[in-house]
Amino acid sequence: MTRAELKRIWAGFGIPADYPAQRGLPLQREATALVSIGRAADDNKIVRLTPHAATAWRKMRAAAEQDGVTLLPVSGYRSVARQSRIVRKKLADGKSIGDILRYVAAPGCSEHHTGRAIDIGSPEDVKLDERFAKTAEFRWLRRHAAKFGFHLSYPRRNAHGIGYEPWHWCWRT
């Protein structure tokens, strides 16, 4: 998707054309090669990642299992179109675009587009909220995820102005 197309999408939502620069968020290319890593713990949809991220996920999940910790996939690859539908639904629910952009990156700027980002839940709760930070799964991820190439993208008070997302991890080469 071109920058001009993204600017048209943003304008329709009331997102400023300089949003990426304001937030320090790069435009993200949509992944084209994706593989399934299983079903989402919350809605049973297929979760997909790039092949390398999927391999790293499987290794990390197996290591966690050996330690008695269950990492559950909730969301992986998300297209620009899907990201746009999420924003549109939240607007229809009465949320302001400012509130939405605290937890949802603008279409074109989400790490989910790359197929390398995964939202992770625990058997206790698959809702994507800050309670995840109190789980054994989060504690395990903080100690071990980097060994598998996964990093917490949005810690507290991050430079991007995105709210704390302890569930959102991105694989980086």
Image: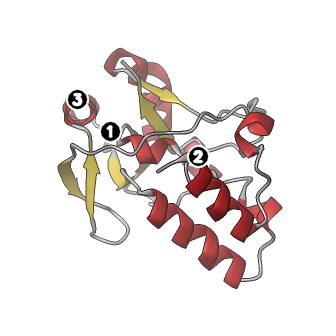
Amino acid type indicated by mark 3:
His
Instruction: Look at 39% across and 45% down and name the residue there.
Output: 30
Distance of label 2 from label 1 (alpha carbons):
41 Å
Whether pointer 1 and pointer 3 mark residues with C-beta atoms closer than 8 Å, the reply is: no
Residue 70 image point, x, y percent: 30, 44
Residue 22 image point, x, y percent: 80, 37
Quadrant of the rendered structure where residue 157 is?
top right
Residue that badge 3 annotates: 52
Residue 98 image point, x, y percent: 82, 60
In this rendering, is residue 140 above or below 112? above
Residue that badge 1 annotates: 69
Horizontal side of 142 relative to 146 (left or right) equals: right
Look at discs 2 and 1 and give the one toward the viewer. 2
Quadrant of the rendered structure where residue 13 is?
bottom right
Instruction: Look at 62% across and 63% down and name the residue there.
Output: 9
Q: How many marks?
A: 3
Task: Give whichever of discs 1 and 3 has the lower sequence position.
Answer: 3
In this rendering, is residue 17 above or below 151? below
Instruction: Look at 50% across and 26% down and name the residue there.
Output: 142
Residue 94 image point, x, y percent: 77, 82
Residue that badge 2 annotates: 3
Count neighbours of disc 3 (C-alpha within 10 A) and say few if under 14, some if 14 to 19, many if 20 or more.
Answer: some
Horizontal side of 88 relative to 24 (left or right) equals: left
Quadrant of the rendered structure where residue 61 is?
top left
